[in-house]
Amino acid sequence: MKIIVSVKQVPARDSNLRVASGGKWLDDSDLSYEINEPDAFALEEALQLKDAQGGEVVVVCAGPERAGSTIREALAKGADRGIHLVLPEDAVLDALSTARLLRHAVKNEAPDLILTGLQSDDLGYGQTGVVLAELLGYAHATIIMQVEVLDGALRVKRELEDGWFQYVTLPMPAVLAIQSGIKKLRYATLMGIKRAKMKPVETILAASLGLELGRAAIERVYLPARSKQSQILTGAPEQVAAQLVEKLKFEARVL
């Protein structure tokens, strides 16, 4: 069973984010980076499926040169090889362009299964896996909590709203967007880190592919304005209570 996992390198969650001087993106001069958390759970699901079914796990990452460390981290955890689609340092692609890059990387791999995280921690589009499935003509499902391999098919558990779940059977090959928190993540062992240095990573310059890539149109990045406002509700207790409930429901939206 060949499983491809799409991973993304994003700023670490505890990073001190600062807006760049031009206001178009973040100042990355002192940022640290890590694997996107939902993608880490997709990788863990792939590794557990490999442990149960056998086969190969291939990690694909589109990002600048520094994203190579994220690929090596995935290899240290147990992935077999990597594919690095190298982008310029300042590239911020939209979901369609990212999916086109990933399709180019996986079209000759003939995978049985492609796993992505549900969304990225930085941009949060939540679209890349679905668009990739459409470009490849594969079946797909999102918000996956559990994956069971059948004879030439998959039975997956999807998380719905209000505590409900849905079970769906899909033919293979398929693309699944994995929900965060479904498994306990493993750590890379010292032996795994040593072995990762010897595992193959194919490097492909995105500019050499001749693909039309659209960048995300970010007009301005800014911090939310802080403001304080007080309202005094007057009237009889019943009227004040009714006004308060209405404001909590329709303005604060906490009810």
Image: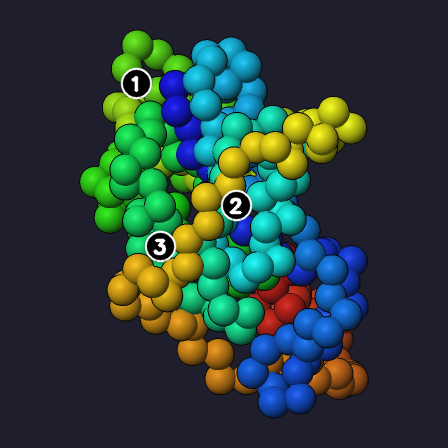
Q: Residue at x 37, y 29 (%)?
A: 113
* Residue 223 position by quadrant: bottom right
Q: Are marks 2 and 1 in contact (CB under 8 Å)?
A: no
Upstream in the sequence, badge 2 or badge 1? 2
For residue 175, side relative to residue 224 (left or right): left
Cα–Cα gap, marks 2 and 3: 13 Å
The mark closer to the camera, 2 or 1, is 2
Mark 1 Cα-neighbour bin, 10 Å: few <14, some 14–19, many ≥20 = some
Numbered disc 3: secondary structure: helix
The structure's colour scheme is rainbow
Task: List x then y, in percent, for residue 59.
Answer: 49, 38
**Three-letter code, disc 2:** Val
Q: Which residue is mark 2?
A: 7
Quadrant into which the C terminus falls: bottom right
Task: List x then y, in percent, for residue 205.
Answer: 41, 59
Q: Are marks 2 and 3 in contact (CB under 8 Å)?
A: no
* Residue 156 position by quadrant: top left
Upstream in the sequence, badge 1 or badge 3? 3
Front one among 160 and 217? 217
Task: List x then y, in percent, for residue 136.
Answer: 24, 42
Q: Which residue is mark 3?
A: 101
Upstream in the sequence, badge 2 or badge 3? 2
Looking at the picture, does residue 97 appear above or below residue 217?
Answer: above
Q: Which mark is residue 153?
A: 1
Cα–Cα gap, marks 2 and 1: 24 Å
Q: Residue at x 47, y 63 (%)?
A: 87
Numbered disc 2: secondary structure: strand
Front one among 209 and 114? 209
The answer to whether one can see residue 207 in this image is yes
**Three-letter code, disc 3:** Leu
Quadrant into which the N terminus falls: top left
The mark closer to the camera, 1 or 3, is 3
